[in-house]
Image (tube, rainbow, N blue to C red):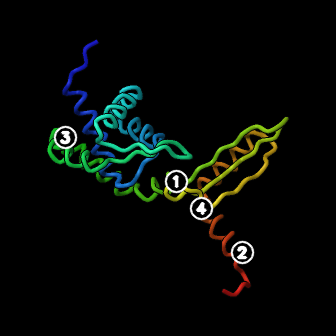
Amino acid sequence: MQVNPKYIAINKLSILYMLRCAAIELRENQLIRLVADHEVMEYFELMRTLAELEEDKFIDITPSIGGNLIAINEIGQTTLDFFKKELSYTWRQKMEAFFEENRSALSLESKLYYDYHRIGEGQYRLTMRILERNFPIFEVMMICSSKEEADRFARGWQKNALDVYAKTVTSIVKNIEF
């Protein structure tokens, strides 16, 4: 099957533009979801495009605890500056508006991590972390009595991690003089 080179170039430019608009490192799973939500390309096309962009040194992919972090680099920025007009103005405006509105939530989402493993009959160890530059700054580990319970706590973590962190720190330093 022949693939149109212009189509491949548009895919690459689309990913570069999304990463530029994000202005943060995105986790691979976030980018997969965003590309699907905005109907930019199919999953396998995205994986091929990311591999080619990394090979051509237009993006940086950094392994991380919660999955690869992806960001546009200076070479990618410069290349995008030359060719961004190949992308429709309407689509570019849509991406800019989306990332402007959702950047904070995406940034927080990329810093929250959880994982659980079965450790025995009906027991799961759930680890939840807040990451900063791929380094855990806060971690909570607990044993759950079922996979469903671990899922429920993980969903709660996604919604309430910053509150849990703030309340924990406040409780620890309460009535302590520095």
Q: What amino acid does circle 3 point to?
A: Ser
Q: Is residue 5 above or below residue 100?
A: above
First reached walking from the N terminus: tag 1 or tag 2: 1
In the image: residue 9, left or right of residue 176:
left
| Total count of labels | 4
Upstream in the sequence, badge 3 or badge 2? 3
Q: Which residue is mark 3?
A: 88
Q: Amino acid at mark 1?
A: Asn
Amino acid, disc 4:
Ile
Give the residue at x 72% y 84%. Answer: 176
**Distance between mark 3 and mark 2 Cα atoms:** 52 Å
Which callout, 2 or 4, points at the residue further toward the start of the chain? Answer: 4
Are the two marked residues, 3 and 4, in contact with CB atoms closer than 8 angstroms?
Answer: no
Contact, mark 3 vs mark 1 (Cβ under 8 Å):
no
Please, what secondary structure does the residue beneath circle 2 have?
Answer: helix
The residue under label 1 is: 134
Residue 146 found in image quarter: top right
Q: Quadrant of residue 32?
A: top left
Residue hosting label 4: 137
Instruction: Give the numbered dot on residue 171.
Output: 2
Residue at 21% x, 45% y: name it.
80
Mark 3 vs mark 2, foreground winner is 2
From the top left corner, tell me how far across and down residue 74 is, in percent: 26, 50
Depth check, mark 2 against mark 4: the one in front is 4
Q: As displayed, is residue 169 above or below residue 133? A: below
Cα–Cα gap, marks 3 and 1 = 35 Å
